[in-house]
């Protein structure tokens, strides 16, 4: 007798992210489908819980390498760019240096921020 997908998803959710992406994904096509479901991938929930994040958007190109090397500082949160925002105001708002803001957003110049609708801020450890 097979467990319903929602029950199996709940059980798989107790596994650490690394185990989900490496071992559990290789068990069978059904488990892989649940873990990597297009609309709500289980690995994303697991990862958010591991790092205490409310959500994770996007996906890395290589999930297993990403998981093995991940630290909270390797991730960013996207924020909408508001009228009048500058690199300096973003740095002050998020307690960052100008260099950190520019590096996280791939900016060579402070003026390049004007071409965007959002900006990225590195995730910091809560401790």
Image (cartoon, rainbow, N blue to C red):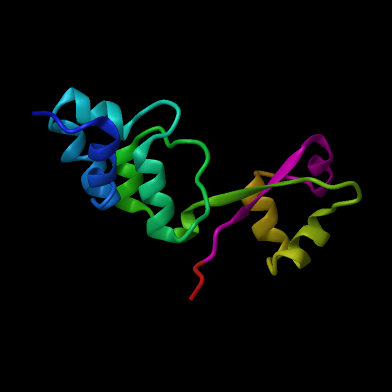
Horizontal arrangement in the rendering, residue 99 relative to residue 57 (left or right): right
Horizontal arrangement in the rendering, residue 116 relative to residue 56 (left or right): right
Queried whether the magenta region covers residue 109, the answer comes back as yes
Camera-side residue: 25 or 113?
Answer: 25
Queried whether the magenta region covers residue 122, the answer comes back as yes
Residue 42 visible (yes or no): yes
Residue 71 visible (yes or no): no
Horizontal arrangement in the rendering, residue 17 relative to residue 24 (left or right): right
Which percent across, then down, holds residue 29? Answer: 19, 23
The number of numbered discs placed on residues in the rendered structure image is 0
Residue drawn at x 53%, y 40% is: 57
Residue drawn at x 45%, y 28% is: 39
Q: Residue furthest top?
A: 29
In which quadrant of the rendered view does residue 25 lie? top left
In which quadrant of the rendered view does residue 115 lie? top right
The quarter of the rendered structure image containing the N terminus is: top left
Which percent across, then down, holds residue 13? Answer: 29, 47
Residue drawn at x 24%, y 44% is: 12
Above or below, comparing residue 39 to residue 117 in the picture:
above
Residue drawn at x 46%, y 61% is: 52
Which range is magenta?
A: 108-124
Q: Residue furthest bottom?
A: 127
Horizontal arrangement in the rendering, residue 44 relative to residue 68 (left or right): right
Camera-side residue: 98 or 23?
Answer: 23
Which percent across, then down, holds residue 110? Answer: 81, 49
Which percent across, then down, holds residue 108? Answer: 72, 45
Above or below, comparing residue 61 to residue 122 in the picture:
above
Q: Residue furthest left?
A: 1
């Amino acid at each position: 007798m097979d467990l319903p997908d929602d029950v199996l998803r709940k059980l798989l959710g107790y596994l650490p992210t690394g185990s989900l992406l490496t071992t559990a994904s290789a068990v069978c096509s059904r488990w892989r489908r649940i873990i990597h479901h297009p609309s709500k991938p289980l690995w994303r929930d697991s990862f958010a819980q591991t790092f205490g994040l409310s959500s994770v958007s996007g996906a890395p190109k290589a999930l297993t390498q990403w998981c093995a090397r991940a630290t909270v500082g390797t991730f960013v949160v996207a924020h909408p760019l508001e009228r009048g925002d500058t690199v300096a105001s973003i740095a002050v708002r998020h307690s960052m240096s100008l260099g950190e803001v520019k590096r996280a957003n791939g900016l060579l110049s402070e003026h390049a921020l004007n071409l965007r609708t959002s900006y990225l801020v590195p995730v910091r450890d809560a401790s």
